[in-house]
Image: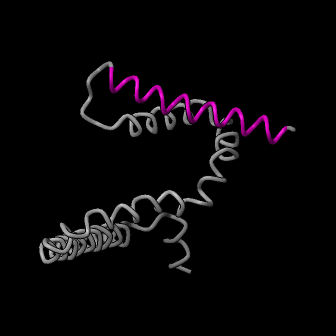
C-alpha cells in the first residue's frame, strides 16, 4: 500500500509539473515546448524537495522500462512519408552524417580539452608528500 501511495504522489507531481509547464508556455507565449518547461519545473521541485525523488522514481520506472513502445507510432508513421524520404534520400543521408560527425568531433575535442586541463593541475599536498617519500 505504501508503494502505491508513493507512486500516486509521484504521478501527481509529474503531471502537475507537465501541466504547469503547458500553462506557463500558453500564458507567457514562450517559444519553447511546454513539456520542456514542465521538466524544468519538476527539476526545480526536486532540488527544493529532494525527498520527493523516491516518489517520482517509483512512478516513472514503469514507463522508462517500456520506453521503446513510445517509438512505435513514430516508426509506423515513417511509411506515410516514404516517398518524401526516397526523393530526398541523399540530402537526408548527408545531413545525418555531417551533423553526427560534427557533434562527435566537437564532443571529442571538448573531452580532450577537459581531461588535459585536469592533468595539468597542480597535485594537492597529499600527493606531493607521497612523491617525496
| 15 part of magenta stretch | yes
Res 46 quadrant in image: top right
Residue 40 in the image, given as x and y percentages of width and height: 43, 36
In the image, farthest residue toward the right: 1
Q: Who's the residue at 39% across and 60% down the image?
A: 74
Residue 57 in the image, given as x and y percentages of width and height: 65, 46
Closest to the observer, 78 or 48 = 78
Residue 114 in the image, given as x and y percentages of width and height: 32, 66
In the image, farthest residue toward the top: 27
The N terminus lies in which quarter of the figure?
Answer: top right
| 131 part of magenta stretch | no
Q: Is residue 127 above or below residue 73?
A: below
Magenta: main secondary structure: helix
Q: Who's the residue at 33% across and 38% down the image?
A: 33
Residue segment shown in magenta = 2-26
Q: Is residue 8 above or below residue 80?
A: above
Amino acid at each position: 500500500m505504501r508503494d502505491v501511495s508513493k507512486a500516486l504522489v509521484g504521478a501527481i507531481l509529474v503531471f502537475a509539473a507537465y501541466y504547469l509547464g503547458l500553462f506557463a508556455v500558453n500564458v507567457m507565449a514562450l517559444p519553447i515546448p511546454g513539456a520542456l518547461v514542465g521538466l524544468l519545473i519538476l527539476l526545480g521541485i526536486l532540488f527544493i524537495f529532494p525527498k520527493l525523488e523516491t516518489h517520482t522514481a517509483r512512478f516513472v520506472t514503469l514507463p522508462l522500462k517500456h520506453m521503446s513502445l513510445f517509438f512505435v507510432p513514430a516508426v509506423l508513421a515513417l511509411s506515410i512519408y516514404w516517398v518524401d524520404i526516397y526523393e530526398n534520400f541523399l540530402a537526408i543521408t548527408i545531413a545525418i552524417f555531417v551533423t553526427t560527425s560534427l557533434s562527435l568531433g566537437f564532443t571529442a575535442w571538448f573531452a580532450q580539452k577537459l581531461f588535459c586541463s585536469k592533468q595539468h593541475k597542480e597535485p594537492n599536498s597529499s600527493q606531493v608528500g607521497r612523491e617525496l617519500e
